[in-house]
Amino acid sequence: MTDYSATGAVENGSLAFIEHKAYARVGLLGNPSDVYYGRTISFSLGNFWASVRLEPSEHLVIRPHPIHDLVQFNSITHMVNRLQSEGYYGGVRLLMAVCKVFYNYCKDNKIDLNGGNFTLSYDTNIPRQTGLSGSSAIVCAALSCLLDFYKVRHLVKVEVRPNLILNAEKELGIVAGLQDRVAQVYGGLVYMEFNKEHMDNLGHGLYTPMDISLLPPLYLIYAENPSDSGKVHSTVRKRWLDGDEFIISSMTEVANIGLEGRTALLEKDYNKLADLMNRNFDLRRRMFGDEALGAMNIEMVEVARKVGAASKFTGSGGAVIAFCPDGPSQVKLLEDACQKAGFIVQPAVVVPSFLNDVDLKTLSSR
């Protein structure tokens, strides 16, 4: 049985370390309406994760990852090639940002932080540029470590934690919505409503966990070396703010897909689910256009559709979630088509909710 829980150790009565995992996530339906006061359904993906380890130490140390925060190179050619494939940033900045946001939140809410210093380190196997929320997974795992180190988990409500993760990423100029962070904080399958009134009054959406057994077998498709993830939120956001009727009506329809999807899952109407997945992607494509989505991303969707599978982005591009309503024979066709196209395909592993008793009490106290 897979262990999705946090790990830790005690030596001589004192805490030796705290370690938490946070998983990649799949936006199943309704995305990207989370940033447009919509509705979405997402789940935590057990195929990939980030882990953060906190150890008490004399000084506060953020430890660079030996691969993802590389600062020593064999040559300038090595460095440039590395930057072209991996970019400039690793996880150190994410750990620093969440520490700052967590500290400021506790200060503003008169939550005392007593516990000394620590060393934070991280690891991750979430593929880059696949739209699986690798950055927020690191931040989420780090936040869990801080909550437990300072023993304040009961003072920071579950609904608030996705906001803290998002705020840490905003510190670094990362543009995103709450959906991904909700899925990673809650785990499992979650239905989310981001009604403007709720957001304005509560500061967060309404999040309803669902039974993961409602999901049919799903398949993750991604490229080993993604070349283009597109600029998905570029002009659409501005057009929405400017009152563009096409964008507003299309985004409303995307949000309704989240609502219809909840009913389809509860009734286990998987033909309806397939239709909704396809319609979700088609609406996104109409709004954003092929250039923004990226040719490779579109090809992943089309490879799945050519064998009759329903398919859509897991997020903003880089990976695709597919459903084969016709069963094992269609799955084999999907696997063969992906192999021929040079894409990786694997069963999507859904992580059960890992909220603990303290987390659940913060939910019930709202």
Image (cartoon, rainbow, N blue to C red):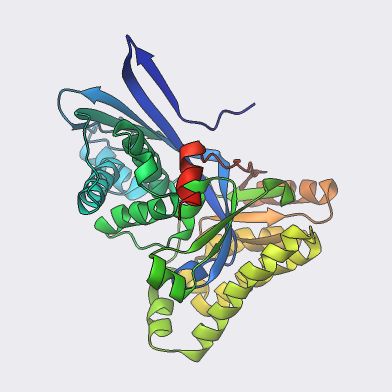
* Residue nearer the viewer, 280 or 265: 265
Looking at the image, how many numbered discs can be counted on the residues?
A: 0
162 vs 334, nearest the viewer:
162
| Residue located at (32% from left, 9% from top) | 12
Tell me residue 200's x, y (percent): 38, 72
Which quarter of the figure has residue 150? Answer: top left
| Closest to the observer, 229 or 143 | 143
Locate the N terminus and report the quarter of the image it occupies: top right
Any part of residue 87 in sight:
yes
| Residue that protrudes farthest toward the front in the picture | 365
Residue occupying the point 48% across, 44% down: 361
* Quadrant showing the C terminus: bottom left
Q: Position of residue 322 (x, y in %)?
A: 68, 55
Q: Quick one: 66 or 153, which is closer to the camera? A: 153
**Does residue 226 appear anywhere in the picture?**
no
Q: Quadrant of residue 323?
A: bottom right
Residue 269, percent across and down?
80, 61
Q: Residue at x 27, y 47 (%)?
A: 102
| Residue lying at the far top of the rendered structure | 12
Residue 73 is situated, as x and y percent measured from the top left of the image, at: 23, 33
- Image position of 282 (left or right of 296): right
Q: Is residue 205 left or right of residue 100?
A: right
> Residue extending furthest left?
59
